[in-house]
Image (cartoon, grey):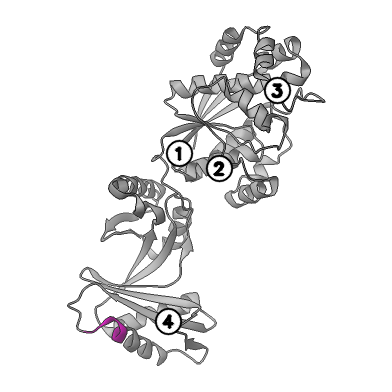
Amino acid sequence: MRNLLLIRYGELGLKGKNKNQFIGRLVRNMRTALKDFDHATVRSSWGRLWAECNSDQQDEVIIALTKVFGIYSISPVIECDRNLEAMSEAVIQIIHQYLPNGGTFKVETRRADKTFPMPSPQISREVAMLAFKQLDDNYDADFFTPELMVDIEIRTEGVFVYGGKIHGAGGLPVGTGGKAMLLLSGGIDSPVAGWMAMRRGLQIEAIHFHSFPFTGEQSKEKVIDLCRLLAKWQGRSVKLHIIHFTEIQKAIRINCPEDYGITIMRRMMFRIAQRVAKEREGLALVTGESIGQVASQTLESMSVINKVVDIPVIRPLVALDKEDIMKVAKQIGTYETSILPFEDCCTIFLPKFPKIRPVSAEAEEMEQALDIEELINEALAKSEQLNIK
């Protein structure tokens, strides 16, 4: 018997003429995820993706593959000889694996190789009968609502038996949707937004606005740690752009009305992020904004802030509430890092009464007091780039 993993890729199968491009990218991403496992291989055949590895590494390989976007589910598969006795042994092994304390099951066969001298229903019955002879009374058949469905596929390439499904990350393979720049603050929301963008096939680079000495090295290290966590899902390093933002915040505080401070600050962030995006061939910005969560996230604020850029702004969290976002953060492993008590530049200089319905013309008039181009150039000149693995 040979141990394999059957990989299901969900919506990629609906991509029509572009299907092979998506599957090809998924295969490359899977191989990257498994590069540190000796003898692990990935192949595509008869409309399926397969991974093979040493049996003692299978659990670790499955964990690695559950972080590859584009995979919807994984099933450990046993390849066995082309006879009923071998199929029965494989079925028993799978039943014991998924129902160790007993339960109900059903055997179902798909006979793609029509040269096998028995129809599918008969194969299922014969194999189930052989299995029952070796199973104790804790096991029973259920044709309608079994706890475990055991599938047998008979093909010219071999006979394959599998049972339970392990859920994958779903979505689309990273890299199929182009590159986007994630505005990464260090809070709970923006890492989740980055994860959700990657899940739709985007490769991300992160932009963090750092206001030393108002925000210290611990705040910077926190963002680096978040990038490290996101890199596990991206399957490759995350390039982090750390933008020196101190002088911009000082200029806004000195020259602009307090209630418009957050609006103008966000407009400056977007201008800088777009500049970096165009230099790095990024096609969009990604933010962790959710409608109404804070003053800068009302529709009026978003509209005024958006006007300073001409590339798309993607807001994956726009309709989620905080509980939804926290749930995803815990699921993907960023929550504990995000809640570390180190301030970012968005939490300093907060006005007591921020403008929640700003007007574009008013923001533009207030910005006349700023040398926008010089401030941006100075910030970019002092910026730092890191590749976080």
Give the magenta part as a residue range.
118-123
Residue 20 spot, x, y in % from top left: 29, 48
Magenta span has 248?
Answer: no
**Callout 1 amino acid:** Leu
Q: Residue at x 35, y 71 (%)?
A: 78
Q: Which residue is label 1 attached to?
A: 202
Helix, strand or loop at label 2? It is helix
Q: Residues within 10 Å of mark 1 (few under 14, many from 20)?
A: many
Q: Is residue 39 visible?
A: no
Q: Is residue 88 visible?
A: yes
**Callout 4 amino acid:** Lys
Mark 4 vs 2, N-terminal side: 4
**Mark 4 and 1 residues: CB-CB less than 8 Å, in contact?**
no
Main SS class of the magenta portion in the image: helix
Residue 231 spot, x, y in % from top left: 50, 40
Q: Which residue is label 3 attached to?
A: 358
Q: CA distance from mark 2 to mark 3?
A: 36 Å
Q: Quadrant of residue 182?
A: top right
Q: Nearer the viewer, residue 388 or 87?
A: 87
Q: Which residue is label 2 attached to?
A: 229
